[in-house]
Amino acid sequence: MARKGERGPGLVPGLVRSAYLVNAVYTESARDHGLTAQQGQLLCVLMAQSYGMGELGSVLRLAKSSLTGLVDRTERNGLVAREPDPRDPRAVRVALTERGAAVVDEFYAETCRRVDRLAAGLTEEERAALGGLLGRIVLDNEVPVVFLAPDL
């Protein structure tokens, strides 16, 4: 644990290493809920709304074949369902099932708790500053909503 005033690794290594840390916590939380990290991402994205396959591929940054396999596996587990798209009879939308909504609610809440604990050594002011700076980076780079803002 870093001591107050101790210099960290710098911006680029700090962002990369923190992304690695968050990803490891996310992956562990997913595993504890019987999910792969990608299935956890899919479910979290679908918390906000259903998506067409093309939109979903863009949000998750997955090739069509990878996305199809992910949706197939998650659908076999009863967590998502393909539904007809009311705007396009040739297309489908992917949505959470009732079971998927229950699983993602638990996974999301636990993942929020685990990620929040990563910043346990920061003061409230430091947490607010870090949140504000990361928020600006996310907005400036137009990152899609892959994880809703928690109500901590």
Image (tube, grey):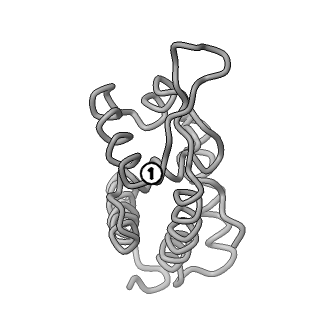
Residue 133 position by quadrant: bottom right
Q: Which of the two residues, 147 or 134, is positioned nearer the viewer here?
A: 147
Tag 1: amino acid = Gln
Residue at which label 1 appears: 41
Residue 40 position by quadrant: bottom left
Instruction: Examine the rendered structure and indicate whether residue 129 appears above or below residue 72.
Output: below
Q: Which of the two residues, 85 or 13, is positioned nearer the viewer here?
A: 85
Residue 8 in the image, given as x and y percentages of width and height: 38, 69
* Quadrant in the picture for the N terminus: bottom left
Instruction: Examine the rendered structure and indicate whether residue 76 appears above or below residue 1.
Output: above
Residue 74 in the image, given as x and y percentages of width and height: 38, 49
Q: Residue at x 50, y 68 (%)?
A: 107
Q: Is residue 30 visible?
A: yes
Instruction: Examine the rendered structure and indicate whether residue 125 appears above or below residue 2.
Output: above
Q: Secondary structure at mark 1?
A: helix
Q: Residue at x 33, y 25 (%)?
A: 64
Residue 6 in the image, given as x and y percentages of width and height: 41, 79
* Quadrant in the picture for the C terminus: bottom right
Q: Which of the two residues, 146 or 119, is positioned nearer the viewer here?
A: 146
Q: Is residue 9 visible?
A: no
Q: Residue at x 47, y 23 (%)?
A: 54
